[in-house]
Image (tube, rainbow, N blue to C red):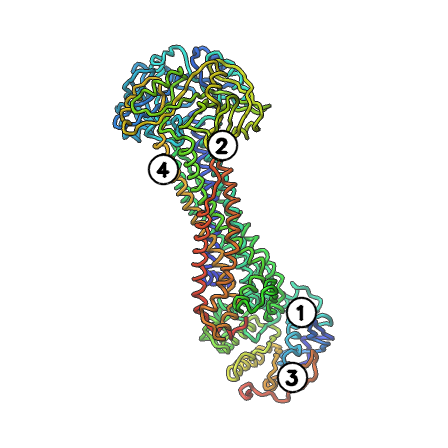
Amino acid sequence: MRMLDRKLVRDLRRMWAQALAIALVMASGVATYVLAGGAYRALEETRAAYYLRYRFADVFAQVKRAPKALADEIELIEGVAAAEPRITHLALLDVEGVAEPASGMAISLPDLREPRLNLVHLREGRLPERDHTGEVTVNEAFFKAHGMRIGSTFKALLNGKKRTLEVVGVALSPEYIYALGPGDLMPDDRRFAVMWMSEKALAAIFDLDGAFNSVTLKLLRGASEAEVIKRLDDLLARYGGTGATGRKDQLSHAFLDAELRQLDALRRVMPPIFLLVSAFLINITLARMVALEREQIGLLKALGYTPLPIALHYVKIVLAITAVGILIGAVAGAWMGKGLTRLYADFFHFPFLIFRHHADVYAASAVVSLLAAVAGAVKSVSDVLALAPAVAMQPPAPTRYRAFVLGRLVPSRALSQLTIMALRHVARWPFRAAATALGIALGVGLLVTALLSFDSVELMIDVAFFRTERQQATLNFTDEKHASALQVVERMPGVLRAEPYRSVSVRLANGHRSRKVSIVGKPREMDLSRVLDRNFDPVRLPEQGLVVGERVAEILGLRRGDVVEVEVLEGRRGTHHVPVTDVIKSYFGLAVFMDLDALDRMLYGPRLTGVHIGFDTGRQDELFTAIKSTPGIGSIALQRRALARFRETIAQNINYSVTIYVALAVIIAFGVVYNSARIQLSENARELASLRVLGFTRAEVSRVLVTELALLTLVAIPLGWIIGYGFGWLLIQAFSSDLYRVPFTIERATYAKASLVVLLATAASALIVRRRIDRLDLIAVLKTRD
Amino acid sequence: MTEAVFEARGLTKTYRTGDVEVHALAGVDLDLYAGELVVLLGPSGSGKSTLLNILGGLDHATSGHVRFCDHDLTALDDAGLTRYRRDHVGFVFQFYNLIPSLTARENVDLVTEIARNPMPAEMALELVGLGARMDHFPAQMSGGEQQRVAIARAIAKRPDVLLCDEPTGALDSKTGIRVLEALTQVNAELGTTTALITHNAAIRDIAHRVLLFGDGRITGTSVNATRKPPSEISW
């Protein structure tokens, strides 16, 4: 081995703690990139492959009843590759051992041929046979949640009649990668089933012989989705079509999209922070190393070494640290990526999961890390190149300190000499002090960002479950019911209060912008399920006009007072012009509300699609039993259960990410403080040892160093709050979609917790360095030339 | 002693340390001859080190000319000076300037790796009497031993000229004499032209020739008719 390389190995061994601290910060950047990048690719590729192999449709439409022959006409629409007519229907389920009613989406499978679109992936058993009307193949999550076996049975209320269904198979479908029940906020595997049945059986049950009520389309490459939807809507209008939608409104697909967007935000935002900080750490550490080895560099030049191999020597040190950082980061990132992917496997139902180790993800993170490291090293290395040997061999001129501004304002006797020393150190290297403070601030900021998700979710829960949706349960009818359905519900056992609502599919248009949404009509005196304004005060729906959520207002560019075009997509169609009377906050979905009476007037007659209820929990079982055999109810959403599921799911997700974030924040804070402290110590060793010789105690001497660190930390913490606020805001923006918006809120306790964690990390690294002060060799330090 | 290895004419050097401007050399004319051992004697700050740095190609003169054999040092750029140092010059400094993370042998090998016709590190170390301490780190050796490692490192490349800047400055008399013995031995055995800077007048007796330095000038020259071996001097 070359002698310089031997020096390299020994130098690295000597400064291993500092090198490791830098490598860990770098590793954090690499790991987040590999994690988020890897998971992003895994999710995206898995989804793409699944969609392709199982021919996931591009366009989805519901009708009341259309003749099968219409499907041939649909296939003739320009741009349509295939159309698959089918029967789908929501049904209430009664599963043995489960008190609450569940609901299921019954989907027909063609009897005499393979389905053209949305193929199911059979996990176990088989598909239902044509002549066996009681056979059903269910989705795997439901099957597992109930510990079912092939041959298990459960009851379903299908078209008013309770039927016993026998499970003959278990399957997955690209339509239900994320299987969310109607009215649910989070998937509840126990309470939502996808049931594939023979077309003949479903047609018989729902009286749809030779007809269909749902159609899915595959488009040709390059076809215009909007154009096809328009033509399709025209065709389906007279059969009770409620407006076709593209994939972006398909629930499962939209949730996956939202998840992908979050991962994308993660991989874009996090790694640069860590790389920036590691570049800074390399910068200060290498600068100090070069300063310390000034004479050695001079000597090498005096011995006849050309500048290049000497500079290369320092570059190699950086490369070695970077290599370790990349290695740790890649391994940790791959490991965490697997963990996250496993989390996905619980959450998203794929028949397979493609988690490949993408060489380019690793390579990109390695290259970017190298660039950051080299950027950090440039200054020091160019100093090495420029150092004239004769100058290097001389001891450096004493550092020029200045009386600092504060010193002129405050009588210097007010501060101890030790404090003045500390303050002058800060003032002497303002860039380094600022960068150190910034590094610590980034640690605080990361923690604020991580912890604010708890605050946001709590606010979301409070608003959604305790202020807005205060009902105990919501009954969704299978289709529109006469207003008298309210009395039926009111008379059910245990029902204390009942509040009707009506949901209608419409297309809202403002100028060239339009969006398919549901208008929810609510009684003016609503009390269970309420509409809140931006200050969370209840809104009284106006006699005329729409109240829209912020997201809808944003999509359509609406403001209070604008008139919006409402195209009704069901029942007696028609186009109306309605004013927007208020824009409100809403966290879930695309909220559009209207006074129930006004909606009934607009749609020519009172109808209901569901009822919110409050009930006597003592009679819950009685109520559930009654619901299970009440025809016309498609599903029931239970608030308490929904909240529990929500908390469970969120906890799982957030805890995982918060743990990672906290670890990263601690690494960054510790790495920055430890390196800064070591460098200060190295620069001031003589000074500090002199103080000891003069009779100062260890504690007093340490104070110089600790005062400096404390000062920087105190400056850093409020800065970190600001950074955290900014990051948090950006992250929350990245997380918001048409499906849900996370409110942006940060509790004071969150700032306090973030600061505390960073203070602890700072204190820990200061203590480690303090131990070195205790071990200062007074004689040796004073004897050697600095 | 006929051939001049170095020929310096009208050398001046001005440089800044911090806020202070220093005229380190104020017109120096000098010849050094092959194989001779010259002592440059003068108080600190008299410009000796500056002269040595310029002769050794560590620094540029502000004005004047230096010729080494057939090289015009004043005309060389940094790369040229580096090549010159690598091929022709051995340095010994007051503070040894060993690389602390390399052993004695490795410190010497630092030079043998880049030299054209080096002697083995072991041989160089034997020459200075350190055959038994080759695998020690600088921190494990005394000051005198460290300085002898530095000498071994300087001679291992078989330099044409050995430039020593206060080689005994940080050492007590006894160890200092061991170091001087090593230097005179090298000068005698290898015939290396040696220039030795000191402010210690006792050392003048070991030289062929003594140049007296003061205020950036050579103020006097004397030739020792009889040289004393280092063992006979003391301070």
Inter-mark Cα distance, 2 to 4: 28 Å
Disc 2, SS? loop
The residue to which callout 3 is attached is: B209
In screen coordinates, is B7 left or right of A279? right
Q: Chain of mark 1?
A: B
Q: Label for residue B19?
A: 1
Disc 1, SS? loop
Is label 2 or label 3 in front? 2
- Residue A747 visible here: yes
Neighbour tally class for label 2: few under 14, some 14-19, many 20 plus, Cα within 10 Å = some
Is label 2 or label 4 in front? 2
Q: Inspect the image, locate mark 2, and give the three-letter code of the amino acid beneath it.
A: Asp
Disc 4, disc 3: CB below 8 Å?
no
- The location of residue B57, given as percent across then percent down, is 65, 69
Sooner in the amino-acid sequence: mark 2 or mark 4:
2
User: Is there one chain holding both mark 1 and mark 2?
Assistant: no
Q: Inspect the image, locate mark 4, and give the three-letter code of the amino acid beneath it.
A: Glu
Q: Chain of mark 4?
A: A
- The location of residue A138, given as percent across then percent down, is 33, 25
Q: Chain of mark 2?
A: A
Is label 1 or label 4 in front? 4
The residue to which callout 4 is attached is: A648
Inter-mark Cα distance, 1 to 4: 69 Å
Disc 1, disc 4: CB below 8 Å?
no
- The location of residue A60, given as percent across then percent down, is 46, 21
Inter-mark Cα distance, 1 to 3: 37 Å
Disc 1, disc 2: CB below 8 Å?
no
Sooner in the amino-acid sequence: mark 1 or mark 3:
1
Q: Inspect the image, locate mark 1, and give the three-letter code of the amino acid beneath it.
A: Asp
Q: Inspect the image, locate mark 3, and give the three-letter code of the amino acid beneath it.
A: Arg
Q: Chain of mark 3?
A: B
Inter-mark Cα distance, 2 to 3: 100 Å
